[in-house]
Each structure stands twice: as C-alpha cells, then as structure tokens.
Amino acid sequence: MTETSKHEWDIPATDDSPHEGGFRADLQITTDRGGPRYGEMIEQVRSFMGKVRYASPTPELADEVIEDLRKLNAKLDTMLVDEWTTPSGTRIDLPSRGNITLPPYEVKDGGPDGVDAEVTFEDFHLGGNGVAHGGHVAVAFDDLGGMAAALRTGGVARTAYLTVNYRSLTPLNTPLVLKTWVDRHDGRKLFVKGTLHDGDRLCADLDSLFIELKPGQP
Ligand SMILES: CCCCCCCCCC(=O)SCCNC(=O)CCNC(=O)[C@H](O)C(C)(C)COP(=O)(O)OP(=O)(O)OC[C@H]1O[C@@H](n2cnc3c(N)ncnc32)[C@H](O)[C@@H]1OP(=O)(O)O
C-alpha cells in the first residue's frame, strides 16, 4: 500500500456512522457509489483475472502487461477510501454487491426464510481439470450463508464453522442454483444449511454455524 493510500484509508468513525466493533451497526447499501459504469469496471477486472489464469504470455507481453497494470494501480491509488465507503461489497444492484473477491452471484430471492441465488464460477475459479476450486465454492457458501443469517436477525454474524460437503464436480461458466437458509436459531447461534445444484445434480451442500455479533464485538 502506498503512503497516500495508507493515510486515506484511516477514515475515522462519525456520530452518523459509528464503528461498532468490527462491523458498522447498519448494513451499508448503495446503488450509486463508483458511478454508473462501476459494474462494467468490475466485469473487466473479473475477465482479466480469468485470462491471467489461462494466459501464457511471452516475456515481451508480460513486460507490456506489467507496465499497463502499474499505470492502472497508480490511477486507483489516487481514489482509495476505507472499507466502509468503497462501492465494493455495498452495491446491491451488482453481482455479489460489486465485490470481486466473491464469485459472481445474483440474489433471486432473499428474506428471513433464506436466500436463493444464481452463482457462476468463472475461469478465474478453476481448481483443476476444468472444474471449480473447492475453496471458491466455500467462499460462495460463506457469503450467502452469512446473508441468510443477516436477513434473519437484521444484524451481522460471523462464521464459527463452515462444513462443505463436495458431492459432485462443480462446473465453470454455468449458472448454478445456490440456496441457504437458517435451519435452527438458538439465541445468537444461527445454524445455516445450504445446497449448490447444477440443474438436478447436487454439487455441494453446507452445514454451518454463524454467531450474531454483540454490540461492539469485532
Ligand atoms: C447482507 C451482507 C451479508 C454479508 C455476509 C458476509 C458473511 C461473511 C462471514 C465471515 O466470513 S466472518 C469471517 C470468518 N469468521 C471469523 O473470523 C470468526 C472468528 N471467531 C470469532 O470471532 C468468535 O469465535 C465468534 C464470533 C465466532 C464466537 O465468539 P463469541 O465470543 O461471540 O461467542 P462464544 O464463544 O461465547 O460462543 C457463543 C455460542 O456459540 C458456540 N460456538 C462458538 N463457536 C463455535 C464453534 N466453532 N462450534 C460450535 N459452537 C460454537 C459457543 O459454544 C456458545 O454456545 P452457547 O451459547 O450454547 O454456550
């Protein structure tokens, strides 16, 4: 991180938006941060990451790409903000709320009864032999399991455990149905289950525990 961004990253909490432990008290949602083409920018980054996974550049092409990336990183260095104000993760109009660290998904339906989403693992999420990496499947379950917990309580929960059973191979570049729901709610404990299907075929299922955070808890 550059000196500039280090300084700009450290934005203090205000009375309007207090830090409540590790999370803000309210879930920040936006549709305009980053401007109307932010989603397109994220798509270009996703596409680039997928190409990097498969590309075998010549040394000359690697030199060119390094130079181009240096320029792009320098551009973004001038616009870094803290995690609470970045569009990434808060743009509810975009796949995965505009968060490139998540596989792209679209929530079809979500509420206290659970979440129904369509997720597509892309070239970037390759594990081996043409199918998805199990870690990326777990990331999708973690985020959408956490969302099911959040929609049940209206607050934020952290994962205590996350067990993913890999039942069959998970294809790339195929829209898949991922569902999560709170199976049992006991005080601060939310036992969340989930499934990932390719059509009728079960690719993986989830057994997890999320703990609702207390005020001020990191
Ligand atoms: C709309 C936006 C949606 C966004 C969703 C994003 C979701 C992303 C979620 C994440 O990835 S969070 C990051 C990964 N998780 C962590 O880093 C958590 C690290 N661990 C902790 O911070 C604490 O251990 C934790 C908050 C999980 C629990 O600590 P606490 O001090 O709050 O709870 P405590 O230890 O008192 O346990 C509360 C209850 O849960 C039980 N428990 C806690 N951990 C457990 C465990 N691992 N297995 C079984 N039970 C467990 C514990 O026994 C107890 O049961 P009882 O109330 O019946 O006594």
Image (cartoon, rainbow, N blue to C red):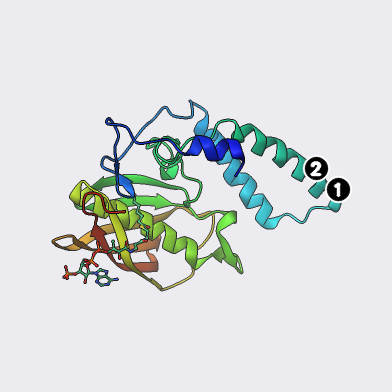
Compared with 143, 206 (above or below) is below
Amino acid, disc 2: Glu
Within 8 Å: ligand 1 and the Cβ of disc 1?
no
Instruction: Say left or right for 63 vs 126.
Output: right
Q: Position of residue 185 (x, y in %)?
A: 16, 61
User: Within the displayed image, which quadrant is ligand 1 positioned in?
Assistant: bottom left
Q: Is residue 59 left or right of residue 149?
A: right
Residue at the (77%, 56%) spot, across then down: 56
Nearest the camera: 90 or 199? Answer: 90
Q: Residue at x 52, y 28 (%)?
A: 37
Q: Which residue is mark 1?
A: 60
Given residues 175 and 148, the one toward you in this image is 148
Residue at (54, 40) in percent of width and height: 6
Q: Mark 2, residues whose alpha carbon is within 10 Å: few (<14), some, or many (≥20)? A: few
Quarter holding the N terminus?
top right
* The residue positioned farthest toward the left in the image shown: 187
Disc 1 to disc 2: CB gap under 8 Å? yes
Q: What residue lies at 75% left-to-right and 45% top-to-bottom?
A: 66
Q: Position of residue 46 (x, y in %)?
A: 57, 46
Give the amino acid type for the residue marked by disc 1 in the picture.
Glu
Q: x, y percentage for residue 184?
A: 17, 64
Q: Which residue in the protein does label 2 denote?
A: 64
How many neighbours does mark 1 have within 10 angstroms: few (below 14), some (14-19), or many (20 or more)? few
In the depicted view, which residue is nearer to us: 211 or 133?
211
